[in-house]
Image (cartoon, helix red, strand yellow):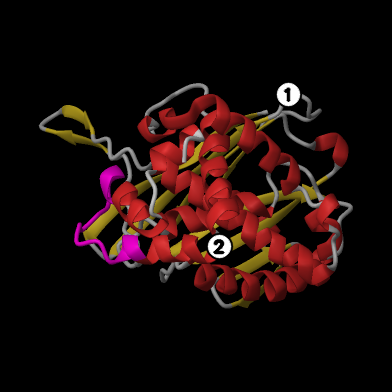
């Protein structure tokens, strides 16, 4: 399976207001169906029912009313818990649009480009059409499940001006017709922390509905994360948004760093790290700010942790 990070274009009136163009894409050649491409207008047909709780809004077809209500209730509550537990705060809302797919229609490629209003992310979530309850939905091992939506929510919560972290992205800008690429070298943190936070969130939902730990979808991702971190080590700190191929092991290794930090120092230290980042005097934090804050909290060099030396 190939994975490409979501891309977000920012239209700024000031530092606090954002308009988002969200692009999500992925592919899996083992799936039987043709490529599926969606726009914001295409999502309207799926918006029969809507429920919300906290920062989470869930929409989907009328035939999935029970699932939509359960996901909004359980997911909204646990999303807020995860934000507080990890110290990732923003005024960003997550709007999930559920799109049921029959097993023989699952697309081999999927992409969506959606214009979203300021402070709200709209993420389409493909899932097995046979899943009518939250338990069945969370057991779905397909890539486009709710964990991806959680990843995007946490990543951009860490970056938006209205959040507490304000981590710099890798923008591509044009000045007098000349393109420039600004590299902040924060992708290891943005995607690693977003994956980690999504795991915490989904795991909380799994616990609420009673899915045993051995049956939880994220277990395989954690194993891949450990192996990729061992292979890549400190190279993750040079990862940027402009790497066009071979990103999957970098996603995995960046998650592996977060899991290694949690295993060695505990989740509370992860929260303390994020609090330290939020208190940094830099307007938008770059790699050095993230490393310096982490080393102050954990008492070790994060490069050493990535190498396995600390």
Q: Residue 267 carries which label?
A: 2
Q: Which mark is residue 236?
A: none
Q: From the viewer's perspective, tell me whether residue 214 is left or right of residue 125.
A: right
Depicted 32 relative to depicted 41: above or below: above
Query: In the rendered structure, does residue 283 fall within the stretch colored magenta?
Result: yes
Inter-mark Cα distance, 1 to 2: 36 Å
Relative depth, front residue between 114 and 54 = 54
Relative depth, front residue between 142 and 69 = 142
Query: In the rendered structure, does residue 127 fall within the stretch colored magenta?
Result: no
Counting residues from the start of the chain, the first of labels 1 and 2 encountered is 1
**Residue 163 visible in image:** no
Specify the segment rendered in magenta.
Answer: 276-289
Residue at the image point whose x is 27% and y is 45% from the top: 288
Q: From the viewer's perspective, tell me whether residue 213 is left or right of residue 198.
A: right
Instruction: Name the image quarter holding residue 172.
Output: top left
- The residue at the far left in this view is 176
Depicted 74 relative to depicted 241: above or below: below
Judging by the rendered image, the residue that carries numbered circle 1 is: 29
Q: From the viewer's perspective, tell me whether residue 203 is left or right of residue 3.
A: right
Q: How crowded is mark 2: few (under 14 residues within 10 Å), some or many (20 or more)?
A: some
């Amino acid at each position: 399976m190939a994975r490409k990070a979501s891309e977000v274009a920012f239209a700024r009136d000031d530092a606090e207001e954002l308009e988002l163009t969200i692009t999500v894409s992925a592919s899996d050649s083992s799936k039987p169906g043709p490529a599926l491409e969606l726009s914001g207008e295409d999502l309207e047909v799926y918006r029969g029912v809507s429920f919300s709780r906290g920062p989470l809004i869930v929409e989907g077809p009328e035939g999935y009313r029970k699932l939509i209500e359960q996901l909004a209730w359980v997911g909204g509550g646990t999303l807020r818990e995860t934000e507080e537990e990890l110290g990732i705060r923003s005024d960003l809302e997550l709007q999930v649009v559920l799109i049921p797919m029959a097993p023989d229609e699952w697309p081999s490629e999927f992409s969506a480009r959606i214009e979203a209003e300021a402070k709200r992310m709209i993420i389409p979530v493909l899932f097995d059409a046979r899943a009518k309850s939250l338990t069945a939905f969370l057991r779905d091992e397909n890539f486009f499940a709710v964990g991806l939506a959680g990843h995007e929510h946490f990543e951009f919560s860490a970056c938006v001006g209205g959040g507490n972290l304000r981590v710099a992205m890798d923008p591509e800008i044009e000045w007098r017709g000349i393109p420039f690429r600004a590299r902040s070298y924060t992708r290891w943190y943005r995607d690693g922390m977003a994956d980690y936070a999504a795991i915490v969130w989904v795991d909380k939902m799994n616990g609420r509905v009673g899915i045993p730990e051995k049956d939880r979808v994220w277990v395989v991702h954690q194993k891949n994360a450990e192996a990729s971190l061992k292979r890549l080590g400190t190279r993750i700190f040079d990862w940027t948004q402009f790497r066009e191929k071979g990103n999957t092991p970098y996603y995995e290794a960046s998650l592996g760093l977060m899991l290694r930090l949690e295993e060695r120092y505990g989740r509370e230290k992860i929260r303390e790290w994020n609090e330290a980042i939020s208190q940094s005097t830099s307007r938008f934090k770059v790699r050095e700010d993230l490393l310096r804050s982490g080393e102050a909290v954990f008492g070790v060099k994060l490069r050493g942790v990535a190498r396995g030396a600390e």
